[in-house]
């Protein structure tokens, strides 16, 4: 499937099977973060964390306690996302292709 894709094509990916190894799960979540809607949600969560950041003085200097990052892109069976295909992500998609069902959107 990857061989037929051109740069700029819109691709819809769905997780058909969750991988057991951490590297493949990390690759899938990294690919999921390329979805415009997920990207927008992560940017909003980062902006809100920055607004709610707690600053306090300890030892004569400012310290900041930050919230944990939002987990919007989660590698679970059945989750799907769409993204633009570029040739720089082709090796990533090829490495996790057995866990995904890929189709043109």
Image (spheres, rainbow, N blue to C red):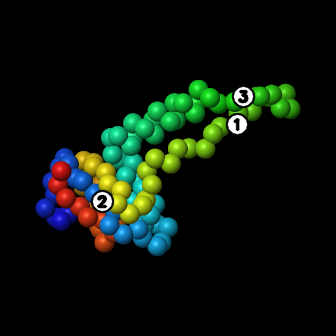
Q: Is residue 27 visible?
A: no
- Give the residue at x 36% y 69%: 17
Crowding at mark 1 (Cα within 10 Å: few <14, some 14-19, many 20+): few
Who is closer to the viewer here, 88 or 1? Answer: 1
Q: Position of residue 75 (x, y in %)?
A: 43, 59
The span from disc 3 to disc 2 (Cα, nearest Å) is 41 Å
Dot 1 lies on which element? strand
Dot 2 lies on which element? strand
Dot placed on the residue nearer the N-terminal end, 3 or 2: 2
Q: Position of residue 1 (x, y in %)?
A: 18, 65
Crowding at mark 2 (Cα within 10 Å: few <14, some 14-19, many 20+): some
Mark 2 vs 1: CB contact within 8 A: no
Who is closer to the viewer here, 19 or 6? Answer: 19
- Give the residue at x 39% y 36%: 40
Dot 3 lies on which element? strand
Left or right position of 40 against 14? right
Q: Which residue is mark 1?
A: 65
The span from disc 1 to disc 3 (Cα, nearest Å) is 7 Å
Dot placed on the residue nearer the N-terminal end, 2 or 1: 2
Left or right position of 96 against 20? left
Crowding at mark 3 (Cα within 10 Å: few <14, some 14-19, many 20+): few
Q: Which residue is mark 2?
A: 14
Q: Position of residue 91 (x, y in %)?
A: 31, 64
Mark 1 vs 3: CB contact within 8 A: no
Q: Which residue is mark 3?
A: 55
């Amino acid at each position: 499937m990857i061989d037929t894709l051109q740069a700029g094509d819109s691709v819809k990916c769905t997780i058909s099977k969750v991988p057991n190894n951490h590297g493949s799960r990390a690759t899938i979540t990294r690919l999921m973060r390329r979805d415009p809607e997920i990207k927008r949600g992560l940017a909003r969560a980062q902006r809100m964390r920055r607004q709610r950041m707690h600053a306090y003085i300890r030892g004569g200097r400012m310290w900041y306690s930050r919230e944990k990052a939002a987990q919007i892109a989660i590698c679970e069976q059945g989750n799907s996302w769409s993204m633009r295909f570029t040739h720089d992500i082709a090796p990533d998609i090829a490495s996790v292709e057995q866990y995904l069902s890929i189709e043109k959107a």
